Structures are given as C-alpha cells and as structure tokens.
Amino acid sequence: MGGRQVQAARRLLAEALDGELPEHERVLAARSVIAELGSPDRLLELTAELASGECDPEGCARLSYRHVLGFDKLLLIDGGPHHMLRAHLWHAGRGAVGKEDIHNHRSPLASYVVRGQLTMELYAPVRIAGDADGGIEADRYQESLSDTAADWLLEPAGPSRLRLTHVAQYAAGSTYALPAHTLHRAWTETAEPTVTLFLETGSGRRRHTDVFTAAGPHPGAVPKVPLRVEEYLSELATLTELLRS
C-alpha cells in the first residue's frame, strides 16, 4: 500500500534484504540501500508523500516516538519482520543533553546522515581481569520488549568494563552500517537540527540487546509512548521542510 515513492522504497528494501543472507552480506546490502534511499531528492519525495497522509499514518504513528535524548524516531516504512526504515530527527535544545548509553541492536543496521553531523563511539568488552587500560566501568543490562505493554524492560546483568575502540564523526552524506552485536553510542551537538535515515534489518532478530551505562541505576521499565497521528504527520511536515531548505 502507499503512493509511488512508498512502493518504490518497499521494492528496493525487499529486493536487497528479504532473502537469507550472512550477516556481513546483510550489513553491506543495508549500507547500499540506505545510501540510495537517503539521497536528498529521493528522501524529500518520500517524506512529502507520507506527510500528505499516504500509506498508513495510524500504523506508522503507533511505532514512532520521542526519544529521551531529544530526537524523534519516525517510522517511514514498516517491512514487518524483515526491515524497518525510520527517520531520526534530532531537535537542537529538546530533551536531555548528553550521550546515549552504550548499546547494541537486535539485528544489523545502517544509517545515512541526511543533514547535520553525528558523532559515534565504538566499544569492546575488556575480557582480561585487571586490564583497565583505556577501560570504563559500566553497569550492564539486558534490554527486551514487554509482551503486554509498549515498554523497554531492563534487567541488571552485573558490572562490566568496556574499552573505547573507535571514534568517528559523520557529516551530511555519510553512511555507516554495523553488525547486531557491535557496541556503540551516537549523539549530535550541532545547533541546527540533524536528520538521519535509519534502517533496521529484521532477519535473525535477537531476543534482547545489551545496554551499558556509567550514569547510575536504570529503572526496571522505561515506557515507550507512541506519537499521536497528528504529531506524527506534523513531524513529517517539519522533516519535509528541513529537506527542502
């Protein structure tokens, strides 16, 4: 369902990602697709079509929400168990200030920086006892989704130590892709809004993710509050205007 741009995006995603692929091939395919869909003209046409009410605004709004770190996660294409295409709209001055927790994902992902700039750090566990060189102490949690409510569930899994392995800055036009287990965190510090296109691939989805925080204990459950349809369409309209500017 949907207009011409939505249908074209669905076909591209299905052709690239719906088959059984080894993870390294899925990561490469996701990066190639996100670069094509993230081109400014194509993304502008897609968001304008969705902002006009094409496709399923009610269904997309139910799976879109405001992140506590100040960005909106707007679902653009729902590929069910195979893939989810989202726009992340980072508003300067909105929400909490700071870096997100170090975490991984349930499946491989890819992202394209449409405008603004993103900083990302990669981490690895320190596995040798007493090796504190470059490491940070963090509390580890296993994060899963509630079966009965739209909440993230966080189960403590003990203390850990992580080592920073890589730092990168991604300007507009940049892409990156990560295997599911890769520990990372990303943030933006630009004064103007930052927009990223974010692709979750769904094949072989893990039951939980790992979350590491040095900021103190987390609550056992964090509510995920979906956007109302009018909020979703309003944010899409804002995104469309940003892409035009």
Image (cartoon, rainbow, N blue to C red):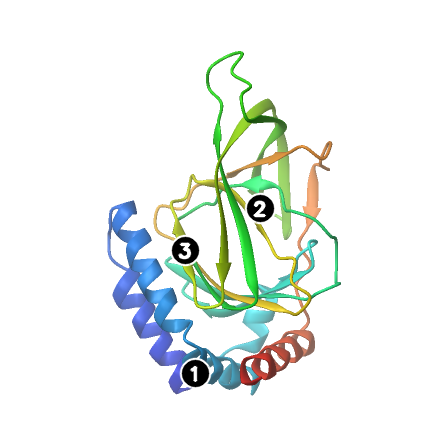
**Up-down: is 208 above or below 177?**
above
Name which residue lies at 62% across and 32% down. 155
Lateral position of residue 106 relative to residue 26, left or right: right
Q: Report, in whole angstroms, how far the alpha carbon at label 3 lies from the one at label 2.
A: 31 Å
Q: Is residue 98 above or below residue 64?
A: above
Disc 1/disc 2 C-alpha distance (Å):
39 Å
Image depth: mark 1 or mark 2 in front = 1
Q: Taking the image as drawn, is residue 201 in sight?
A: no
Q: Where residue 44 appears, x then y in whole percent? A: 48, 82
Of the residues under marks 1 and 2, which one precedes in the sequence? 1
Answer whether labels 1 and 3 touch (C-beta < 8 Å): no
Pick whichever of labels 3 and 2 is earlier in the sequence: 2
Indicate the quadrant containing the N terminus: top left, top right, bottom left or bottom right.
bottom left
Earlier in the chain: of badge 1 and badge 3, it is 1
- Residue displayed at 49% across by 23% down: 126
Judge the density around disc 3: few (<14), some (14-19), many (≥20) Cα neighbours within 10 Å.
Answer: some
What is the distance, in whole Å, between disc 1 and disc 3 at their CAs? 20 Å
Residue 128 visible in the snapshot: yes
Q: Are marks 3 and 2 in contact (CB under 8 Å)?
A: no
> Which amino acid, mark 2?
Asp
The residue closer to the viewer here, 36 or 106, is 36
- Give the labeled residue for mark 1: 41
What residue sits right under mark 3 in the picture?
A: 176
The front one of 20 and 239 is 239
User: Does 20 appear above or below 197?
Assistant: above
Give the left or right position of residue 84, taking residue 65 as reference. left
Q: Is residue 123 left or right of residue 159?
A: left
- What residue is shown with label 2? 147
Observer-nearest of 201 and 117:
117
Q: Within 10 angstroms of label 2, few (less than 14), some, or many (20 or more) residues?
A: few
Disc marking residue 166: none
Q: Mark 3 belongs to which amino acid?
A: Tyr
